Amino acid sequence: MAKFNVTFQSFYNIYVLWTYQKLQFLIFFNSHTGFLLKIVVAAAVKVIVVVVVVAVVVVVVVVVVVVVVVVVVVVAVVVVVVEVVVLVLVEVVAAAAVVVVEVVKSSCCSSSCSCSSSSSRNSSSSRRGRSKYLYVQLFYIHFEDMR
C-alpha cells in the first residue's frame, strides 16, 4: 500500500507541476497580451496606410493619364480644324483672285484696252484654270511646309 501511495503521490506531483506550468504560461500570456495586441494593431495600421497610399497614387496616375489624353485629343482636334480652315481660306482666296482677274480683264476689254480675239481668249481661260490650280497647289504646299 505504501508503494501505491508513492506512485499516486508522484502522479499527483506531476499533475501539480503541469498545472503550475500551465498557470505560469497563462499568467505570462495574460500579462503580455496587451503588448501582442499592440503589435498586431500597429502592423494592421501600417498595412492599411500602405494600401491607402498605393490607392491614392494609382488614382493620381490615372487622373494624370486621363488629363494628358484629353489634352492630346483637344490639341489634335484644334490642329485639324485649323488645317481645314486654312485650306478653305486658300481655296476662297484663289477663287477670289480668279474673279478679280476676270473683273479686271472684263473692265479692261470694255474700256479702251485692246482685247484679244475669241480664240486667244479661250486659250487664256484654259491657262487661267491651270494657273488657279497651280496657285492652290502652291498655297497647299506652303501650308504643308509650315506644319
Image (cartoon, helix red, strand yellow):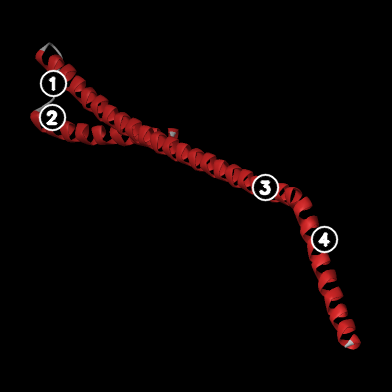
Q: Is there a contact, CB below 8 Å, between mark 3 and mark 4?
A: no
* Marks 3 and 1 close (CB-CB < 8 Å): no
Q: Which mark is residue 24?
A: 4
Q: Position of residue 142 (x, y in %)?
A: 39, 33
Secondary structure state at the residue bearing disc 3: helix
Cβ–Cβ under 8 Å for marks 1 and 2? yes
**Could you say where residue 115 lies in the image, as x and y percent from the top left?**
13, 21
Q: Quadrant of the N terminus?
A: bottom right
Residue type, mark 1 in image = Cys
Who's the residue at 10% across and 27% down the image?
117
Instruction: Please indicate whether residue 131 sits to the left or right of residue 39 in the image.
Output: left
Whether label 2 touches label 3, CB < 8 Å: no
Question: What's the mark number on residue 41?
Answer: 3
Residue 121 bears which disc, if any? Answer: 2
Q: Amino acid at mark 2?
A: Arg
Q: Which mark is residue 115?
A: 1
Residue appearing at x 44%, y 35% in the figure: 71
| Vertical side of 81 occupied by 18: above or below | below
> In the picture shown, does residue 50 fall above or below 8?
above
Question: Label 3 neighbourhood size at 10 Å, few (<14), some (14-19), many (20+)?
Answer: few
Q: Residues within 10 Å of mark 2 (few under 14, many from 20)?
A: few
Residue type, mark 3 in image: Val
Residue 147 occupies quadrant: top left
Residue at left offset 74%, top offset 52%: 33
Q: Position of residue 64 (x, y in %)?
A: 51, 38
